[in-house]
Amino acid sequence: MSLQPFESKEIERAYAWLREYWRRPIDPEYHRVSTVQEALSILGAYGRRARILAGGIDFLGLMKSGIESPEALVNIKPVKALEHITLSRDSITIGALTRIRDLERSPIIERQYPILSEAARGIGSPHVRNMATLAGNICQETRCWYFRRPWESGISYACRRKDGGGKCFALDGENQYHGLMGKGDCVAVCPSDMATVFCAMDARIRTEAVGGGRTIQIKDFYSEYGNILNPGEMVTSVQVPRLSPGTEQRFLKFRIRKAIDFAIVSVASIIKMDRKGKVTDSRIVLGGVGYGPYVANGASEVLAGEKITEKAAEKAADASVSALKPLSKNAYKIPILKALVKRAILGQGRSVRFSQGSEAPGVAR
Ligand SMILES: Cc1cc2nc3c(=O)[nH]c(=O)nc-3n(C[C@H](O)[C@H](O)[C@H](O)COP(=O)(O)OP(=O)(O)OC[C@H]3O[C@@H](n4cnc5c(N)ncnc54)[C@H](O)[C@@H]3O)c2cc1C
Ligand code: SF4
């Protein structure tokens, strides 16, 4: 049956309305690129309407749920130049497309940064780690259940983070997995374990864009609504300074399911001591607390110049949480954080002391 022009127009209008109502993803233009330049020119042309696809673990799920519907999808997986672990005299640079599995298995990383191998091992399942990339991990979206609720479920939450306006449903709702920074516009937490560990390592993120790239300290990489990348900007690598031998490194993660689960809270610690066993430098970072990794400066102040004792660890643990402000249902995170910080300082759990000499500079893989 052929439709009259009027009917056809009505149907188109109804279809457009339905598509808007159900938030069905529009079919994006798909670009498979093999160089950074190619990716940048497409990202530059589409701006906010284009999105990068790496392993797809997070982003494809968001598209299926109708939360993301880009006009152009730029698959950067074939860009081999972004898949590397490179040593220089004073740093290690890890390419954006390095897979979590590669970080988990790299002997260089295991020797130099056991904290990174430890965190990588605890991410998802072997399947997830085989696909997931480093940049994808640090750029993944929040796990807030209001945000992630698919439109198809019949109940969706057009919260501030999703739609710019509206309210934050977690603020006075089910906020047991949310932040400890008090009331804010969006109280979701950064789900990336890599971000917590990189922050303890004082890592820097290198980005590229059509007009030029920049270097961002990981502690400045996040804002209340996600990362601070501009439209058209992509992460190309993460650079971590080399640590001196004798530096204690630990990553401890508390999760509800022992296998395959995001952190409820986590702690990454880097502690350097002199020959007499006194702390000369330390950095203690908490995950599951805020929109980005939370640097517990108070704990480092307590530890400075001290020998590691049960009492010092306890004082530092208290100091690490003293500025945190739980929401109505997540105060339970505080004692867990204190226990993890204390254990990390006392070297309980998996001990990861870096004591090797320096590796030769070059591309490690
Ligand atoms: C079952 C399961 C368990 C998990 N457990 C954990 C866990 O315990 N800890 C943890 O940290 N994570 C966990 N994750 C999350 C997982 O690690 C991330 O989803 C994954 O690392 C994303 O990487 P990807 O390469 O697949 O990114 P994609 O899904 O392809 O992309 C994710 C986001 O990053 C952006 N992006 C990707 N590459 C770049 C780039 N180079 N520059 C700029 N933006 C970019 C994309 O546009 C997108 O917005 C889990 C995931 C699953 C499914
Ligand atoms: S915490 Fe953020 S993502 Fe979750 S409901 Fe509130 S505004 Fe939305």
Image (cartoon, helix red, strand yellow):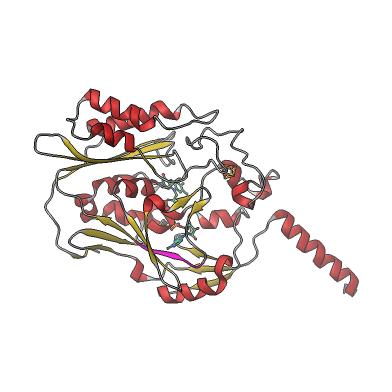
Q: Is residue 204 left or right of residue 132?
A: left
Residue 16 is inside the magenta segment: no
In the image, 18 versus 309, the foreground residue is: 309
Q: Where does residue 153 sit, x and y in percent of width and height?
A: 67, 45
Q: Residue at x 11, y 52 (%)?
A: 357
Residue placed at 63% from the left, 52% from the top? 164
Front one among 25 and 157: 157
Q: How many marks?
A: 0
* Overall secondary structure of the magenta section: strand
Q: Ligand 2 is found in which quarter of the picture?
A: top right
Q: Is residue 337 visible?
A: yes
Q: Where 190 falls versus 321 (above or below)?
A: below
Q: Is residue 208 left or right of residue 20?
A: left
Residue 236 within the magenta-colored segment of the rendering: yes
Going by the image, does 280 lie left or right of 70? left
Nearer-the-camera pick, 132 or 286 = 286
Looking at the image, which residue sits at the far left?
275
Side (left or right) of 61 relative to 39: right
Can residue 270 be seen here? no
Q: Vertical placement of 53 versus 187: above or below?
A: below
Query: Magenta stretch?
Result: 232-237
x and y percent of residue 150 in the render?
63, 48
Q: Please report the residue visible at 47 percent of the width from the left and 35 percent of the height from the top.
A: 180
- Picture coordinates of residue 329, whole percent (x, y): 54, 28
Quadrant of the rendering where the C terminus is positioned:
bottom left
Location of residue 157 (image quadrant):
top right
Placement of the N terminus among the 4 image quadrants: bottom right
Q: Position of residue 346 (x, y in %)?
A: 23, 30
